[in-house]
Image (cartoon, rainbow, N blue to C red):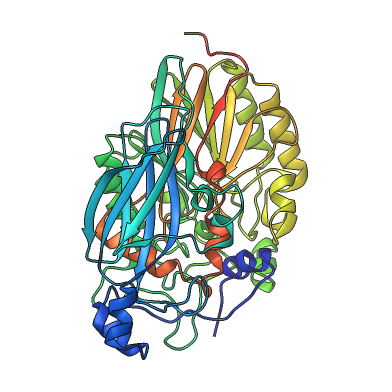
Amino acid sequence: MSISRRAYLSVATLAASSMAVAKTSGAYGLEYVTSGLGLTQSDSKSWQVLASDLEVITVTDTSVAFTWATYAPGVQTAYGFIKPTVPSDERVLLGPADSTQLELVHEGYSESGYHHVVIDGLEPGREYRFECWSHNCRAVPSLNITMSKTAPEKTGVVSTLPALEGAHLATFALTNDTHIGKPNHDGIRIGNLGLSSGPGEQPFASMQLQGLVDTVKAAGLDTLVINGDCTDSNRPEEYDELIRVLDTFGEFGKNWFVTRGNHDVHPPGLPNINGFRGRGIRKGKTAVPDYFSQRLVPTQQHWSTRVGEVRLIGVDTAEFGYAGGRINERQMRALRAELADDPERPTILFAHHPFTQDAVRSHFGGEAFMVEAQQAKIFQEILAATPGAKGVFAGHTHRSRRGIADYGDTDFCERGAALGYPGGYTQIRVHTDGYQISYHRTTTPQSLSWSTKTRWSMFGLEPEFMLGKISDRNYVNFFKNKVPL
């Protein structure tokens, strides 16, 4: 029996714990599910479906994306063992918040019972009222984070992001924690329990990454950054699969880029490096092959590239024998020189581990889970002295959370994972006056189905930690000084 440390820490951060989540299958017919729940046919006719788990997952300056799920009558959400969804119709009503009228802006049907609807053509910086419906049942939120007094899912009002007025410089995609080779999404291995791929199905981590690649390509983007924990346990076959999938997107070092995460320096096949395992590696008693360096990027070496007029820098914060982050002196000097060579250049940086004390205080893993405190301080001071250093994006925690810098005004943000709920990527659109951050779900049918399953990870508690507020997932960071062209 084992439970991954990350899964444990995620739920512990919410001051909750549980042991397992049942395996699931996909959507069932309504009659099948209601009979299994002991409900009569008249019950199902009178209530029809339960529309729940409403989320306003994406907001941009001109669009909004709604998701919800339909369950059989009488199903209890938000926590517990996994509940199968049922097929249903879907309707979205929307209108300006200052209007008394809502218009039908979308009508469709979901065989899976998982509903993902994107509404385009909206006005920047404007409030809209909305309602999402299935079978004459209005969709409602179920997670605490979506039921707060100010959450759009609770108020029924969403604001589009303000428009950036400056010249467009670059747009690219970011994701993290792909964990290729991971056997169970929730890290649980207790007999037949745990969320994993079914017999004959493509391994879920590979399916999620391939779906993400296809979704990003369909969005017209040609640059993708994978920000650490590319593999689950540093095995050669995991790198083979990672590169195979990413090569369908484009060329390494031109179209797709990677940073190293702590899972990419694990002893091959081991789920973690906690306790004696980490000590053995640090003392040189346990040798760990460096496949990441052989196949992708050398150890403790940053990379730099240009997308349009924007500089992207990937930082290696992984160190053998540690779950938390480290940056050695050689890499720190190289980063300082890189930034000093063109300090005004608009620059976005990527590192697997978070840097700030805000991240430390808000996560049960504490300092040992983040970049070492003194190195984090030096790194932030370098950025604070670099006018062009606009933002730093991390993974590792698998959550969406916008943080606060300890030094300077660089934007620090953690982004949700690719391998499961909420399952998607971040679009970063940079202009001369700021950048827009928006989180987008992977929209392939297989991935949307997987989202319905992994929404129940750790008895449904883990999504409370992963989703983040709408302002963590989607926001505009206005620059204090406009970038000169």
| Front position in the image: 361 or 239 | 361
Residue sitting at x 49%, y 70%? 457
Residue sitting at x 65%, y 26%? 336
| Front position in the image: 315 or 145 | 145
Q: Position of residue 155 (x, y in %)?
A: 53, 48
Q: Residue 460: tell me if it is visible.
A: yes
Residue 109 left/right relative to 315 = left
Residue sitting at x 58%, y 36%? 392
Q: Quadrant of residue 112?
A: bottom left
Q: 234 above or below 200? A: above
What is the total number of numbered labels drawn onto the structure image? 0
Residue 366 left/right relative to 309 = right
Residue located farthest toward the front when viewing the structure as drawn: 100
Q: Quadrant of the N terminus?
A: bottom right
Q: Quadrant of residue 287?
A: bottom right
Residue 23 left/right relative to 6 = left
Q: 468 above or below 476? A: below
Residue located farthest toward the top when viewing the structure as drawn: 485
Q: 203 above or below 408? A: below
Q: Position of residue 434 (x, y in %)?
A: 52, 22
Q: Position of residue 403 (x, y in %)?
A: 65, 42
Residue located farthest toward the right when viewing the structure as drawn: 374
| Front position in the image: 195 or 105 | 105
Q: Residue 266: tell me if it is visible.
A: no
| Front position in the image: 258 or 287 | 258
Q: Position of residue 326 (x, y in %)?
A: 66, 48
Residue 151 left/right relative to 242 = right
